[in-house]
Image (spheres, grey):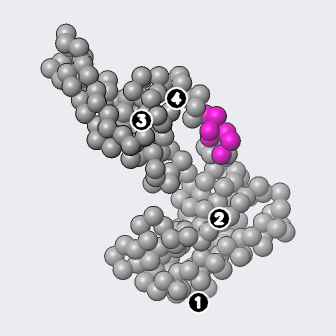
Amino acid sequence: LPNVTTVGVLDADLGLYTDSFRAAETTFNMLTQVVGRAGRGDSEGKAWLQTMNPNHKVIQLAANQDYDGFYELEVNLRRVQNAPPFGDFAAITFTGMDEARVLRGAVKFKESLNSLLGSQYSQEQCTVLGPAPCPVPKINYHFRHRLTLRCRMTKELRLLLAHLLRQFSIDRENRGVTAFIDINGYD
């Protein structure tokens, strides 16, 4: 777009405050793309970024289009957090119209998982967080709660989770509750 000389982004830092481990990457990508749109022709371009946190490192790196600096920041942060590609996050979401039943199912699933991780699967490095309400806790009259696993998704752990999901689905106490797993999902 050769005639675009000015670009503005409102609330440029808003995407940084989501619960996704990809939040910084997504924000950096969006900002560098939009900043790069201004001034492609013969005219000089300007980009205006509105932010509540102008000193945030991701905002500064994006404004300067410093890809190498962002990579170093992000890869070190992911290494410390054991986030992909150094580890995995798995979200196990429970949904149903009866919130008490949904929560009870999530707690029971967590107890079963922790029990197996403490015995037969003790070689698996896995931390189970939750259950907690999902960021959007209710959709179409269905309540949603989530367990979050910080782990390395090995074949054994995948098989264990598949087994627990099958057991969950045939347990009569979980009637009306659905469970599914999203590994390293895009929120």
Q: According to the image, label 3 marks what residue?
A: 54
Question: Measuring 59% from the left and 83% from the top, which residue is drawn there?
Answer: 104
Residue type at mark 2? Leu
Q: Is residue 102 above or below residue 6?
A: below
Residue 117 visible in the displayed image: yes
Contact between marks 3 and 4 (CB within 8 A): the answer is: no
Q: Quadrant of the C terminus?
A: bottom left
Query: Residue 116 location, x and y as percent?
Result: 78, 70
The nearer-to-camera label among 1 and 4 is 4
Quadrant in which residue 151 is drawn: bottom right
The stretch in magenta equals 75-81
Q: According to the image, label 2 marks what residue?
A: 129
Q: According to the image, label 1 marks what residue?
A: 172
Q: According to the image, label 4 marks what residue?
A: 70
Residue type at mark 3? Pro
Q: Secondary structure at mark 3?
A: loop
Contact between marks 2 and 3 (CB within 8 A): the answer is: no
77 drawn magenta:
yes
Q: Earlier in the sequence, mark 2 or mark 4?
A: 4
Q: Residues within 10 Å of mark 3 (few under 14, many from 20)?
A: few
